[in-house]
Amino acid sequence: MAKKHFVFSMMLAACTLFACNKSESVSSGSNGIRYQAEEYTDLAEDAVFYEGRIYVDNVDLYGDMISSVLTSALSSTTNGNDERISDVALSNFEFSLVQFYIYPSEADSMTYHLESAKLVMANKAFAEQKVEVAQMVVVDGINGKVIFAPTTDDLLEWIESNRPDEMYFEYKLRNFTQAAGPLNVKYEILTSFDFSYESSEDK
């Protein structure tokens, strides 16, 4: 199982327009989505011929971003009037953090046996519609983490066009036998993005 969090930040009202029976405004700000596993997964158990995948639970990245904006916007409604949200626009999307948590006692084994890992984003309905979003860089045994380097490419257009509904880590092991013991990991993924929207408040 995994937890999915909306990470909210303050919204800034850019301008306000007045009509006969409602006020309209354009607001903007920054939000983020965090996907985080609740339990550890043993890479050794899931690997077949030294390769395996870990799927991130409950992924609907575009929908999650829009939902987070709407939730944040509606929570700021004032005066007890109905709020109408429209023209939501996203920008400056990035994967700001990708990492595994590991047990410090398994750090040496992880360093020796985990050859590579990467995070992939995809649409299940179209096998060819996938993109690599982060590559493993180093096993940081001191801090109990495996660090990934996210891509610097602008992926927002791809996300809006392909509506990815899954993310998974692909990994490879080397020089591994079951006698080598478990290789437990727990993922954390954090995205960030800017947004704007128009809102009108019924009078």
Image (cartoon, rainbow, N blue to C red):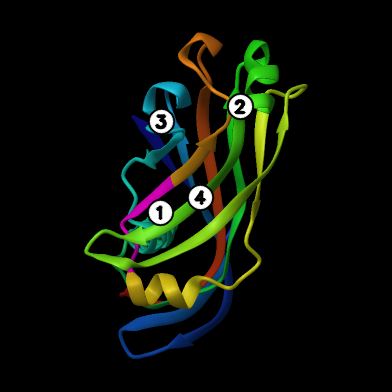
Query: Looking at the image, is mark 3 or mark 4 nearer the viewer?
Result: 3
The residue that disc 3 covers is 47
Structural distance between the alpha carbons of marks 2 and 3? 12 Å
Q: Quadrant of residue 9?
A: bottom right
State which tag comes first along the sequence, 4 or 2.
2
The residue that disc 4 covers is 119
Image quadrant holding the C terminus, namely bottom left
Image point 40% across, 35% down: which residue? Answer: 3
Q: Tell me the kind of residue under disc 1.
A: Ser
Structural distance between the alpha carbons of marks 1 and 2? 47 Å
Q: Nearer the viewer, residue 53 or 30?
A: 53
Q: Tell me the kind of residue under disc 2.
A: His
Helix, strand or loop at label 1? It is helix
Image quadrant holding the N terminus, namely top left
Query: Looking at the image, is mark 1 or mark 2 nearer the viewer?
Result: 2
The part of the chain drawn in magenta is 163-168
Name the spot of residue 178 as percent of width and height, x first.
46, 14
Mark 1 is surrounded, within 10 Å at the Cα level, by few (under 14), some (14 to 19) or many (20 or more) other residues, namely few
Helix, strand or loop at label 4? It is strand
Mark 3 is surrounded, within 10 Å at the Cα level, by few (under 14), some (14 to 19) or many (20 or more) other residues, namely some
- Lateral position of residue 177 relative to residue 116, left or right: left
Query: Looking at the image, is mark 4 or mark 1 nearer the viewer?
Result: 4
Q: Nearer the viewer, residue 29 or 49?
A: 49
In the rendered image, the vertical position of residue 199 relative to residue 75, given as above or below: below
Would you say the residues marked 1 and 3 are in contact, meaning their CB atoms lie under 8 Å apart?
no
Helix, strand or loop at label 3? It is loop
Residue most extreme to the right:
142
- Lateral position of residue 27 relative to residue 200, left or right: right
**Residue 113: which disc?**
2
The residue that disc 1 covers is 75
Would you say the residues marked 4 and 2 are in contact, meaning their CB atoms lie under 8 Å apart?
no
